Image: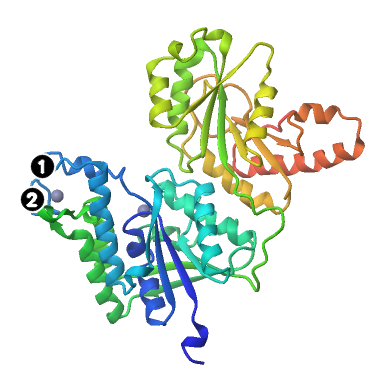
Amino acid sequence: MSVCSQKKTILYFSPHQDDELLSMGVDICNSVSGGHDVHVILCTDGSKCTVRDELANGKKCDKCPGIHTYQLTEEELTAARDEEFRESCRALGIEDGNVHILKNRFSDRKLTVYESKKTILQYLNVMGPDCVVCTLDPNPENHRQHCDHKGLGYAAAELFNEGFIRELRIFTEPYFSEFFQHKTDFIRGETRKVIDTATALVQAKIQKAAEAYSHWEPGAGRYAVGYHDISEAFDALLKKGSSYCHICKRETVVPVPGVSQCRKLVVSLVSYPARLNSAMNALATVYEQKLTPDAVILWLASADFPNGEKDLPDGLVKMTEENGLSIRWFGDGMRLHDNYSRLFNEYTDALVIAVADAMLCHERFTENLYHSYLFYLEKVPDIRICFVPISIARDFALCEEDLYKIITYCNDEVSSLKVLQDENRKLQDDLKMKHSIIVRLAKEIGKLKREPKI
Ligand SMILES: [Zn+2]
Ligand SMILES: [Zn+2]
């Protein structure tokens, strides 16, 4: 068979400037030399990288010949990183026209599963459903993995499960290769593990691409950002480039009806004046999650704050400005369930995680819940899930265990208590079945020692 008859369009979604090389570079080179139509899509601007502070710290380092006296704006840092990225793609053999830098990209740490899904779908709509989709492997056991890598990875896995992707390749970062053997239990169907090591020809391209990330020429806007950020990964790559890939394939592309919606992940909490300080501490931990929520909502009673936002502490106002925290007011007589009712109406089909205002969240809790949700989605496809805390934690010493009970929300019912009281037998049986799955789900993620009492 000629190369041409097997020609595929292969899309590499890179969370940051450098992931295309560090984790997918070997595969990209092989795809290019295989005659395929290869595209690389950069999904964030990389502006929050800590190298920006490092370059201004007045010190000398062993990664560049200069002294760090450079006060770059976030935009300048992005421009420097984009240049590294473009040069790297060129060295890997990708035509300039096939290098895509998303307009209105998110800053790093903001790449949610929802936004990633929208981006991937956008490209599949334009390029055709038969494209091969490549990105990073979201590894629930790897707690050091970047949240943007997880966001893109889970999005691609979900789209594969939902029948939108015929061939999915997810790459374990070579600097985390010890996690390569993990079970991809959230992927429906068989996956094949492949380790590719660079041939001499590929290694030469990899070396050239790596030079893009260590290029130091401040006068020309080049600051070796990639190399300053993660030099050990580049050093390892220069010794021997490898890609660690899980390949997942399906016979046909058949989107499962009704699941094509992208679901937002929403975190919600309720508080009152006496507990606002602890609520802010809880919120700070929400913003450190390994899987980034799309929205974080704090509910306050308007009667408690007669002057509205003017009565809020500065720290909270700062969170609305810097983190996008959304504050919602509720009036007299509203109960907790009413808030959720409003939330579900606003975020149709969202996954809502309720946290307590007196509880710090373990940094992995959104990811653990999400991973389990993906794992169980097939068994309860119409589920709407709300995770709520078992009790207000007694102190701030936070562990992952024993903190959550999980309530299902069926159809448009927002109170499972109400559903349980329903006379309809069938509905009760249905709920019991779901409930038992949810209990298993909770046990699975190790967050529950007691059976939840609904
Ligand atoms: Zn990255
Ligand atoms: Zn330096």
Marks 2 and 1, Cα distance to the nearest angstrom? 9 Å
The three-letter amino acid code for the residue at tag 2 is Gly
Q: State whether label 1 is within 8 Å of ligand 2.
A: no
Residue 21 falls in which quadrant of the image?
A: bottom left
Indicate the secondary structure of the residue bearing disc 1.
loop
Closest to the observer, 413 or 442: 413
Residue at point 52%, 87% (across, down): 5
Instruction: Note whether 15 is above or below 411 in the view shown.
Output: below
**Dots 2, 1 in contact, CB < 8 A:** yes
Q: Position of residue 158 (x, y in %)?
A: 59, 56
Residue at point 38%, 20% (across, down): 315
Instruction: Note whether 283 is above or below 16 in the view shown.
Output: above
Residue at point 53%, 53% (across, down): 118
Instruction: Note whether 162 is above or below 297 in the view shown.
Output: below
Indicate the secondary structure of the residue bearing disc 2.
loop
Please indicate, yes or no, whether residue 157 appears anywhere in the rendered image: yes
Q: Position of residue 448 (x, y in %)?
A: 63, 35
**Residue 163 appears left or right of 37:** right
Q: Quadrant of the C terminus?
A: top right
Q: State whether label 2 is within 8 Å of ligand 2.
A: yes
- The number of discs equals 2
Q: Which residue is mark 1?
A: 69
Residue at point 45%, 58% (across, down): 179
**Residue 213 appears left or right of 412:** left
Badge 1: few (under 14), some or many (20 or more) residues near its Cα, within 10 Å?
Answer: few
Q: Which residue is mark 2?
A: 66
The three-letter amino acid code for the residue at tag 1 is Thr
